[in-house]
Image (spheres, rainbow, N blue to C red):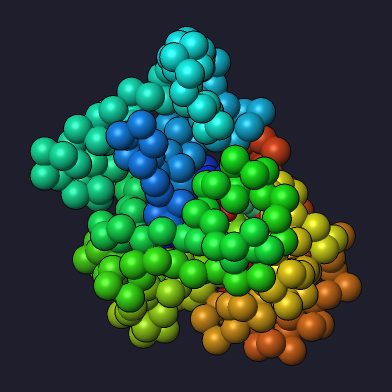
Amino acid sequence: MWAALAGGVGGAKLARGLAAIAPNEIDELRVIINTGDDFALHGLQIAPDVDTVLYTLAGIANPTTGWGIADDTASAQAQLARMGVDTWFWLGDRDLATHIMRTHWLASGFTLTEVTERLARSLGIAPHITLLPMTDAPVATEVQTPAGWLAFQDYFVRRHHADPVRAVRFAGISRALPTTATVTALRAAEVVVFCPSNPIVSIGPILTLRGVRQAIEHREAEAHPRCCVAVSPIIGGRALKGPADVMLASMGFESSAVGVARLYEGLVDIFVLDESDAHLAPQIADLGMRPLVAPIIMTTPEESRTLARRIHRAVAV
Ligand code: GDP
Ligand code: CA
């Protein structure tokens, strides 16, 4: 069994590749997903990163945005606007069905983990692939900007991640625990993959949950291979999408594959960086990680699968 840590779009792209080589090369995949982006809107519980992974693995994600459902329509959104509702957060008609049922099932007493499992199976995700929210407790990522502390979706969507970020905090994280399913997956995994997600606001909340680092460091899996692999979300100093590069820089980290690798020091054995960053490999090696240089841009499902295969071969060596 392999476990993967993922945020939204970048995470889902590698998760799709790992899912594509299961159950053959990998018998089972469990994807642990950031819930720090979750929020309530119009009374609905929205879990943006969970949904991005859900739709991507179900093969229904919008290929242009990477989030939302392909060919979704916006009749409800138009009607909300007509009613004078501020529609800063785009909600497609089909996407709304997910939020309605999540909200209903949560209100009926199911955990977010159980709700996510129901959604995954109802959308046809194969039984050897499990989507695990990192926690069932509320955690809310907030960013400190010159305009003050902002709720994550306010910063990211409403304000188009234009504010410089000085610090981040994860409200509720000291009380939240990772789910049992998350800890079990990490401890039992032969391989843990850190997907190319934003290291600060996507992977960061998962690693900050009490016990997660320890679960990765002290894994039980007897099977060979047994290691931890990270893929860089930064290529040539830039994020492919979103604010990871400017966020790293404004928080005092280096905006490069090396800057990301430093954040994972002591946890990761193999660090995958893009061919165009091959000159950084010695610096990765100096951090005690084995650098793996490969094409890491995943525009198509085939590119995701190819990268997953590369990782699978690398851990077997
Ligand atoms: P979000 O929650 O939707 O912002 O998504 P993530 O945190 O999972 O991913 C955001 C990161 O994904 C950004 O830093 C991008 O640079 C990275 N990313 C997006 N597409 C790719 C890709 O094809 N390859 C790699 N290596 N990184 C990617
Ligand atoms: Ca996200």
Residue visible at 39% across and 36% down?
41
Residue visible at 47% across and 60% down?
141
Quarter of the image with the C terminus in it: bottom right
Please provide percent x and percent y for residue 249: 76, 70
Please provide percent x and percent y for residue 232: 68, 63
Confirm whether residue 210 shows in the render. yes
Does residue 203 lie above or below 83 as drawn? below
Residue 278 placement: quadrant: bottom right
Residue visible at 59% across and 57% down?
197
Confirm whether residue 232 shows in the render. no
Q: With 155 as the anchor, is 170 left or right in this view? A: left
Q: With 189 as the anchor, is 142 left or right in this view? A: right
Does residue 4 lie above or below 63 as drawn? below
Please provide percent x and percent y for residue 235: 79, 59
Q: With 194 as the anchor, is 294 left or right in this view? A: right
Please provide percent x and percent y for residue 103: 25, 35
Q: Which one is in front, 29 or 178?
A: 178
Q: Which one is in front, 88 or 206?
A: 88
Quarter of the image with the N terminus in it: bottom left
Residue located farthest toward the left when viewing the structure as drawn: 109
Does residue 83 lie above or below 285 as drawn? above
Number of disc labels: 0
Q: With 120 as the anchor, is 31 left or right in this view? A: right
Q: Which one is in front, 60 or 149?
A: 149
Residue visible at 57% across and 27% down?
62
Residue 163 placement: quadrant: bottom right
